[in-house]
């Protein structure tokens, strides 16, 4: 089976190292394909995203790397773009301005429609920010918060059409079974609605291991139960470790592969010669 990772963060955003260090490690691991996906610029102060003024530097670095490693590794330039209604740019802006090879769409900040200036940060290493945002923005109403999250997922897919949907059930990461159970009917209904939207879109869903190896979540994104539904809906998947350092490029990949097979998948999507192709899972 081809070995690859399309979800990779270098020191151009919140990753640890230069892109060539990831490329060297990918070659050592026997990878065929490596996609870089810095967090796209966002219009507010932050410590995680590519700075607007560094976009040309990022483009140049990845394109030069493509040429230098062309005989050893297929390298592609993408972005992981946050979707925040009313704040984030259209994905097509970055596609056209930067000539991206692919786009990953993700939700890390959830907007409450009644508090337009407030964003619930559901990511990061600490569950305390998750809890504080739920309290201050959604007044501890977890159903409203989760509904806002999955509505954003659906809106992002419908309006922005990313190639890959990132960590589709990330809302569970800092929940830890405290605020809701993933088998509650109201939660299942919200997930099922999002999956139907994905199925109609043609988007690829990533199976992401970062929550597990960072010990922030006991499960993959998405869960096995969701993957089984995606398989029935004929939604293609890709494998991702969401690496923020070269050492993370292959972390959890064995679990990803075995879980995909358990869900019924026989093929996985990978970029080959500039196009998405389905390759056999072995």
Image: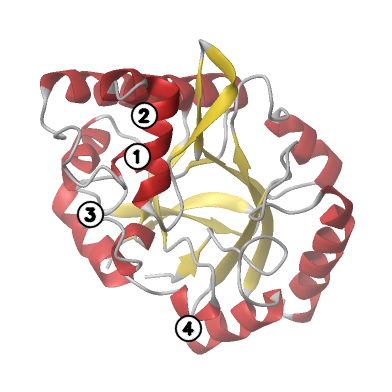
**Residue under label 4:** 30
Could you tell which of marks 2 and 4 lies nearer the N-terminus?
4
Q: Name the residue located 37 percent from the left edge and 48 percent from the top edge.
A: 128
Q: Name the residue located 57 percent from the left edge and 35 percent from the top edge.
A: 162
Graded by Cα atoms within 10 Å as few (under 14), some (14 to 19) or many (20 or more), the crowding at tag 4 reads few
On screen, residue 275 versus residue 181, left or right, reads right
Q: Are marks 1 and 3 in contact (CB under 8 Å)?
A: no
Query: In this picture, is 87 found above or below 254?
Result: above
The quarter of the image holding the C terminus is bottom left
Q: Are marks 2 and 1 in contact (CB under 8 Å)?
A: yes
**Residue under label 2:** 135
Helix, strand or loop at mark 3: loop
Could you tell me how far apart the alpha carbons at marks 2 and 1 are, in whole angstroms? 6 Å
**Residue under label 3:** 219
Q: Are marks 3 and 4 in contact (CB under 8 Å)?
A: no
Could you tell which of marks 1 and 3 lies nearer the N-terminus?
1
**Residue under label 1:** 131
Quadrant housing residue 139:
top left
Could you tell me how far apart the alpha carbons at marks 3 and 4 are, in whole angstroms? 26 Å
Graded by Cα atoms within 10 Å as few (under 14), some (14 to 19) or many (20 or more), the crowding at tag 1 reads some
The quarter of the image holding the N terminus is bottom left
Residue 144 on image: x %, y %: 33, 17
Could you tell me how far apart the alpha carbons at marks 2 and 4 are, in whole angstroms? 46 Å
Could you tell which of marks 4 and 1 lies nearer the N-terminus?
4
Could you tell which of marks 3 and 2 lies nearer the N-terminus?
2
Could you tell me how far apart the alpha carbons at marks 1 and 3 are, in whole angstroms? 20 Å
On screen, residue 64 versus residue 215, left or right, reads right
On screen, residue 220 versus residue 273, left or right, reads left
Q: Name the residue located 10 percent from the left edge and 31 percent from the top edge.
A: 183
């Amino acid at each position: 089976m081809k070995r690859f990772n399309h979800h990779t963060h270098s020191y151009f955003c919140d990753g640890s190292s230069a892109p060539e260090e990831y490329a060297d490690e990918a070659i050592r691991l026997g990878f065929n394909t490596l996609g870089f996906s810095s967090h796209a610029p966002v219009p507010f102060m932050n410590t995680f995203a590519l700075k607007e003024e560094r976009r040309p530097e990022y483009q140049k670095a990845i394109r030069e790397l493509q040429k230098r490693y062309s005989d050893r590794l297929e390298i592609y330039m993408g972005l992981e773009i946050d979707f925040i209604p009313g704040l984030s740019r259209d994905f097509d802006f970055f596609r056209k301005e930067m000539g991206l090879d692919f786009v990953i769409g993700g939700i890390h900040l959830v907007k409450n429609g009644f508090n337009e200036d407030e964003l619930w940060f559901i990511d990061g290493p600490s569950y305390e920010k998750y809890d504080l945002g739920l309290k201050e923005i959604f007044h501890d109403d977890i159903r409203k918060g989760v509904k806002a999250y999955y509505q954003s997922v659906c809106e992002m897919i419908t309006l922005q059409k990313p190639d890959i949907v990132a960590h589709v059930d990330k809302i569970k990461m800092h929940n830890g079974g405290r605020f809701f159970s993933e088998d509650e009917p109201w939660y299942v209904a919200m997930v099922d609605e999002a999956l139907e939207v994905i199925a109609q879109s043609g988007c690829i869903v990533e199976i992401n291991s970062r929550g597990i190896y960072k010990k922030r979540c006991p499960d993959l994104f998405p869960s096995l139960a969701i993957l089984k539904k995606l398989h029935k809906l004929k939604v293609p998947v890709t494998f991702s470790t969401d690496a923020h350092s070269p050492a993370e490029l292959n972390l959890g990949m064995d679990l990803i592969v075995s879980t995909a097979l358990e869900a019924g998948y026989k093929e996985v999507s990978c970029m080959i010669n500039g196009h998405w192709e389905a390759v056999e899972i072995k």
